[in-house]
Amino acid sequence: MKHTFATVAAVAGLVLAGTVATAPSASAQKIPVGCASPQLINSAPIMYGVGSQTWRIGTITQYWGWCNSAKRNWAHVHLYQGNEAFGLQIAIQTRDWVMHGLKTVNDGRDFTSRPTDTLSVDTRARVSGNFWNGGLATLTPVQVTPWT
């Protein structure tokens, strides 16, 4: 009995260690492919309202980091459970209203814009478009972080 308990405990430990070793990092969803070392610039709630009711449905965040050995920034959206992208556009916006790194997302709750070389000018993260929350909904107004 003692030997069986030790064997079961050892196997359970190996399974748990293997699960932890292969589980994706929670922050991996915030980082575009080819990028590393994300540094938070700013963030803002994503709000959705109907009539006089308003709900926070997620967060939009702006990061900078190293992408293929170059300093870049990008936007990240996290939608809370029950909400999913369905034609959301995410980008870094400059004061001339140009969208950099623009990406349209049609599913999922965690996604990023493409990395962009806009760190030398004022920028903000921006998300607009449609999402699904049991029915089709539109972000109005456009949701943004503060200017940097």
Image: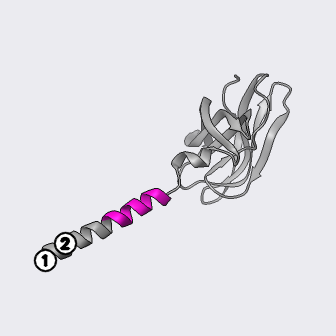
**Horizontal and vertical percent position of residue 107:** 68, 58
Residue 56 placement, left or right of 90: left
Label 1 sits on what residue type? Met
Q: Decide whether residue 75 is among the magenta residues.
A: no
Residue at figure coordinates x 78%, y 36% from the top left: 116
> Are the residues flagged by discs 1 and 2 in contact, CB closer than 8 Å?
yes
Residue 4 percent location from the top left of the image: 19, 76
- Alpha carbons under labels 1 and 2: distance apart: 6 Å
User: Does any portion of residue 51 appear in the rendered image?
Assistant: no
Quarter placement of the N terminus: bottom left
Q: What stretch is highlighted in magenta?
A: 13-22
Q: Mark 1 points at which residue?
A: 1
Image height of 86 relative to 62, above or below: below
Whether residue 17 appears in magenta in the rendering, the answer is yes
- Residue at (72, 51) in percent of width and height: 130
Judged left or right of residue 54, residue 103 is right
Task: Find residue 73 and report its horizontal and vertical position in percent.
Answer: 71, 34
Residue 117 on image: x %, y %: 79, 32
Q: Is mark 1 on a helix, strand or loop?
A: loop
> Would you identify the image quadrant in which residue 6 lies?
bottom left
**Residue at x-position 55% and y-position 56%:** 82
Graded by Cα atoms within 10 Å as few (under 14), some (14 to 19) or many (20 or more), the crowding at tag 2 reads: few
- Name the image quarter holding residue 57: top right
Secondary element under disc 2, as helix, strand or loop, is helix
Compared to residue 43, the image places residue 134 above or below, namely below
Nearest the eye: 26 or 82: 26
**Which quadrant, please, contains the C terminus?**
top right
Q: Is the magenta stretch mostly helix, strand or loop?
A: helix
Q: Residue 5 carries which label?
A: 2
